[in-house]
Image (cartoon, grey):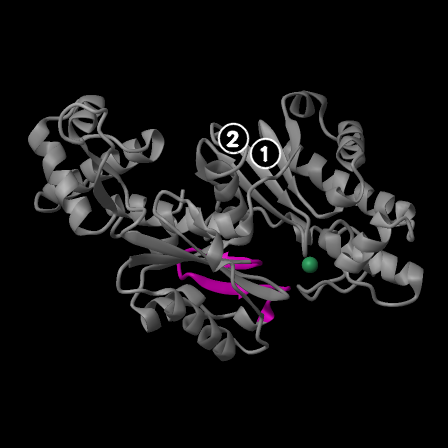
Amino acid sequence: MPNSTAQPQLLSQMNERSVLRLLQSTGPCSRADVTRQLGATAPTVSKAVASLLRSGLLEEFDAPSNGRGRPARQLRLATESAQVIGLVIDAGECRFVSAGLDGSLDSDTGRAFPTPNSYEALIEAAALEVESLLTPEVQTLGLGISLPGLIDSNTQKGLLSPNVPVTNGHSPALDLSERLTLPSVLLQECHALCLAERHYGNARRLDDFAMLDATTGVGLGVLTGGRLLTGMSGLAGEIGHLPIEQDGHLCGCGRRGCLETLASDTALTRLVSEQLGRDISFDEMAQLVALGELNIDESLEEVASHLSFALATAINLFNPSTLFVCSRMLDLDPGLLDRLRERTEGLALRPSFDACRIERARGSKREGTIAGIIVYLTDARVQLDIPVSSGIQ
Ligand SMILES: [Zn+2]
C-alpha cells in the first residue's frame, strides 16, 4: 500500500497514464473528448493534461476547422515538439533511429556504425551519434537500447552477450543516460522485437504471443497476459542455448552444440561456407541464390529441421496464440515458412499446435527500441520506485 503522502501523487500519475493510454489508442482528441471517454471530471483531466504538457509528453495543436468557427484545439502525443531515440546494438553494426512519441519513425535518421571492439569505444561512438540528433527545437525525451544476450533487468547490466561480448558486465543504458542526461532503457533484443510486433506489426491486439528470433543467434520473447515474461531477473526465454549436439560447434556462450549454432541465419551461412570451401556472407549467399548460381537446398533443410524443433519447443512450453518467426532465411525460399509449419506440426503437441498460428515477424529491432522507450516513459509514471527496465511491459 502506498503511504498516505505518496497516494495523491500515485493517483495523479495513474490519471496521467490513463490520458496517455487513451491518446495512444485513439490518436488526437480534444480535452472534452478525453474527459468524456475517460469518464473523469474536467478538473482531474485538466490537471493531468497540464502535467503531461509540462513534461513534454503531450502537445496541443489546432485541428483544421470544418469551415465554421475557430479551429478546435486538440491534444496528441508529442510529435513535432519532442522525439525519442532508439539504438540497436548488434554483432556487426549499431543502428540509430528517432521518432515522435506517437511512434512515427523519422526515415532520415537511420544511421549506422560498425560495432566497436571495446566497450568504451562503443559508448563514445553511441554518445556522439545521439548528440548529433539533439536539436534545440525538439525536446529529446529518452533513449531505448536493444542488446542481444542476457540482461539483468534489476541492474540493467549485460551479463552474457555471446554476439556482442564487449558489453558483458556493462550497462550501456546507465552509462549513456549519465553521459547524455537522458532517461534510457535497455531491452533484451527479443523483448524489443515483441514490443515492435505489438506496436508496429501484426500483434497489435494480441496479449499472448511469442517471438522466435533466428537471425544472428536464436532467442525467444514471450508476451503472456499482455506482459513480457522476464523470469526473476530478465533471463527467461533463452531457448538458443539448449544443448542439442554433444561436441557440436563452439557457441558464443562457451559451450558446444547449442541450438543457436544449428538453427539461425548464422548457422545457415556457416553450412553454406563449408559447402563452398570459403567464407560467404549472408548477403552474398542471398544474391547468388536469387541469381540461380547457388543451390543451398540441403543446408537450408538441415537448418529448417532444427528451427522446427525450436518452434515446437516454444509452442509446447508457452502456448502462444501466434508464434512469430524472425529470420532472413525466409527471404531465400518462399515455400520455407509452409515447410516449417508442416515440420513443426509433426513435433509439437497437437492441442498446442492447433491453437497457434506461425507467422513471419513484421516488426524490427529499431521499432522495438522506440516502442520500448515510449512504454517506459509513459508507464514509468506510475512505477517511479521500480527499476528502469521493469517499466517495460
Ligand atoms: Zn550457447
First to last magenta residue range = 148-165
Q: Is residue 258 visible?
A: no
Residue 63 lies in the magenta stretch = no
What's the distance in space between the residues labelled 2 and 1, CA to CA? Answer: 9 Å
* Sooner in the amino-acid sequence: mark 2 or mark 1: 2
Quadrant hosting residue 33: top left
Q: Residue at x 76, y 65 (%)?
A: 250
Identify the residue under disc 2.
Answer: 208
- Position of 105 with respect to 135 (left or right) is right
Residue 78, image x and y in percent? 28, 46
Identify the residue under disc 1.
Answer: 318
Q: Nearer the viewer, mark 2 or mark 1?
A: 2
Q: Secondary structure at mark 1?
A: helix
Name the kind of residue labelled 2 in the image: Asp
Residue at the farthest front position: 67
Disc 1 C-beta below 8 A from ligand 1: no
Q: Residue at x 49, y 70 (%)?
A: 169
Disc 2 C-beta below 8 A from ligand 1: no
Residue 158 lies in the magenta stretch = yes
Q: Residue at x 11, y 36 (%)?
A: 46
Relative height, residue 95 to residue 35 (above, below): below
